[in-house]
Image: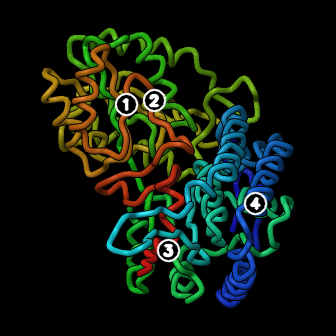
Amino acid sequence: MKSINPANGNLIKEYKEHSDAEAEAIVKAVDSDWQIWKKEPFAQRKTLMLKAAAVLREKKAAFAKTISEEMGKPLSESMAEVEKSAWVCDYYAVNAEFLLADERIQSDASKSFVSFAPIGVVLAVMPWNFPFWQVFRFAAPSLMAGNAGVLKHASNVQGCALAIESVFRLAGFPSNLFRNLVIKSNQVDAVIKNPKIKACTLTGSEFAGSRVAMAAGKEIKKTVLELGGADIFLVLKDADIQKAAKVAVHARMLNNGQSCIAAKRFIIDQSIEKEFLQLLHAELDKLKIGNPLDEKVNVGPLARLDLREEIHAQIQSSIAQGALLERGGAFIKGDGYFYQPTIVTNLKSGMKLYHEESFGPVFSVIRFETEEQAIQIANDSDFGLGGSLWTNDLIKAEKMAREIESGGIFINGMTKSDPRLPFGGIKKSGYGRELSHYGIKEFVNIKTIWIA
């Protein structure tokens, strides 16, 4: 298993993979520590989770460097990711006991209530694009709920995976409560079948999600899936266009365009399309592309060579079908997997960039004439993760937000995740929720207790 620097194509490190027997032994050790951990009071869990947040902040610079080297995001974004991971640890450390408090319910009993008990070891299959945040937004609530975790991280970010494992050890958690499995995708089914694994969570592609869901379904084990997205960035003619364009560039180019909730389909009122495009060009001109370890760089490389080829193929296919290339659309010469920020307009139904998730720095622009047509375009997708809606008419915005099929809509702001708010999608973007009180209750036994 190799970690390769996408900025130059150089090998960072090779990692020896765990055999199926070694993975089984690790799961057994995790379950053993869980038998003790599940009995720990919230006060002890809180103390350790706050220490985990402190470790993240203390080692933020080193962790951020590992992130940027392994998957290519700008160093400033990697620093922010580590800080956000510490935030989610803080949030659940402080709030878990309240979120999982017994819920009294009036019934025909003298007393009836719902309790929330841990279920055991949860397998997390995680992607490379937010290698710390994706893991901690699962781990913090799961461990605070009294569960244990095993991580199957993406093969190209094993340095991050081992760093995350070290955070919990340095914080004082039981040494095997959260472990990393250095395994390939074809070994995941065997881990899911292990009777000590009680549930699975996955963030990743549709294909990976369907595979994990099938394997878990055969074993009657719960799954939470956060899959792809083709998030809208819908701009009405009465919007603050300058602000919208500025945020649009950040919402699309964050993480070099490699985010499930990045703005991807820019649905623009035809009366303001020309002005909006001019503003997009102006904002893109300000960006500096280069080595992600350079603090002045805004845009780094794509994480892998195949990802660059895939985004290029989507763009070329759409142009061949009649879309118009406004900007970019080509590899950047030199070392690494860099790609030009790209704007494609005149997109129609049937084109790849209209329908497929695009994981890279491409703005897919679709114009509309009426607001009814805008909603139809927004919902004309197999995905439904997030979305951004821009208008100065907030009454209309709320009405339209309710009609758009997605797990979240952000009005006059970019789509983002927040520990206080539920996060997840519908349709092929997955099911279940992470974060907030909804997320911490995904992997607990919601138990009814009735007393005569």
- For marks 3 and 1, give the CA distance: 35 Å
Asked whether the beta carbons under mark 1 and mark 2 sit within 8 Å of each other, the answer is yes
Find disc 1 in the rendering and name its residue: 388
- For marks 2 and 4, give the CA distance: 36 Å
Q: Residue at the spot x=65%, y=69% of the render?
A: 146
Residue 43, labelled with which disc?
4
Task: Give the percent coordinates (x, y) of residue 305.
Answer: 56, 50
- Between 162 and 405, the residue placed more toward the observer is 405
- For marks 2 and 3, give the CA distance: 34 Å
Rate crowding at label 4 as few (under 14), some (14 to 19) or many (20 or more) other CA atoms within 10 Å: few
Identify which amino acid the numbered label 4 is placed on: Ala
Q: From the viewer's perspective, is 171 left or right of 406?
A: right
Q: Residue at the spot x=19%, y=44% of the render?
A: 350
Q: Quadrant of the N terminus?
A: bottom right
Q: Residue at the spot x=66%, y=65% of the render?
A: 143
Residue 215 visible in image: no
- Between 116 and 12, the residue placed more toward the observer is 116
Q: Establish if 144 lies above or below 88.
A: below
Label 4: state its secondary structure: helix
Whichever of callouts 3 and 1 sits on the residue coming sooner in the sequence is: 1
Label 3: state its secondary structure: strand
Residue 445, labelled with which disc?
3
Identify which amino acid the numbered label 3 is placed on: Asn
Identify which amino acid the numbered label 1 is placed on: Ser
Q: Residue at the spot x=68%, y=90% of the render?
A: 21
Q: Quadrant of residue 292?
A: top right
